[in-house]
Image (cartoon, rainbow, N blue to C red):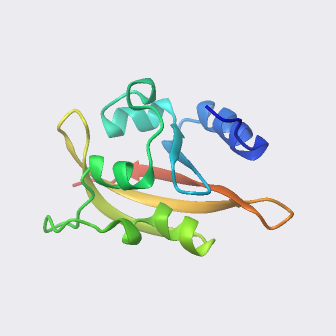
């Protein structure tokens, strides 16, 4: 495992101490961490899933619109944020890895160094009432 940028390390530490679900990706969109509140909504501990590339995490939870139409990776807030280096938000359905369907709202923010280098993105999300 390669050394992560200090900003990702610090964001992971912050996420680990917060009560809201947080999902953290690197500059390529690779999942590098999600915290315990996110584990409850995603249906599996991060220690069990580990890091995964965007093509995997963007499909493993089966993001979909309310009518069940699969949501393409490029339409997910975190993917938009990484690709366009801007905040993005949206709501959609996922199937938690414990089998529970969940309606979530996501707000994603880019993590950009003062040198204008994108080091990753962070998503804060929560479950919406069905």
The residue nearer to you, when weighing 117 against 129, is: 117
Q: Is residue 43 above or below residue 72?
A: above
Q: In this view, does 82 lie above or below 45?
A: below
Residue plotted at (76% across, 63% down): 117
Q: Is residue 50 above or below residue 27?
A: above
Most extreme residue toward the top is 47
| Residue 15 placement: quadrant | top right
Most extreme residue toward the front is 2
Most extreme residue toward the left is 67
Most extreme residue toward the right is 115
Residue 124 position, x and y percent, is 52, 51
Disc count in the image? 0
Residue plotted at (39% across, 59% down): 105
* Res 98 seen here: yes
Residue 22 position, x and y percent, is 52, 44
Q: Is residue 121 above or below residue 95?
A: below
The residue nearer to you, when weighing 110 against 107, is: 110
Residue plotted at (14% across, 64% down): 68
Query: Position of 43 compared to 122: left or right?
Result: left
- What is the quadrant of the C terminus in the image? bottom left
Residue 71 position, x and y percent, is 27, 67
Residue plotted at (26% across, 52% down): 94
Residue 42 position, x and y percent, is 34, 39
């Amino acid at each position: 495992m390669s050394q992560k940028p200090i900003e990702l390390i610090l964001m992971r530490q912050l996420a680990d101490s917060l009560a809201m679900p947080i999902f953290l990706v690197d500059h390529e969109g690779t999942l590098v961490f999600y915290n315990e509140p996110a584990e409850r909504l995603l249906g599996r501990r991060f220690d069990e899933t580990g890091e995964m590339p965007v093509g995997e995490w963007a499909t493993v939870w089966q993001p979909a619109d309310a009518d069940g139409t699969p949501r393409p990776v490029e339409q997910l807030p975190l993917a938009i944020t990484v690709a366009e280096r801007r905040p993005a938000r949206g709501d959609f359905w996922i199937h938690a890895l414990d089998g529970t369907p969940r309606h979530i709202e996501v707000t994603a923010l880019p993590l950009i160094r003062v040198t204008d280098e994108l080091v990753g993105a962070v998503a804060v999300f929560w479950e919406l009432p069905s």
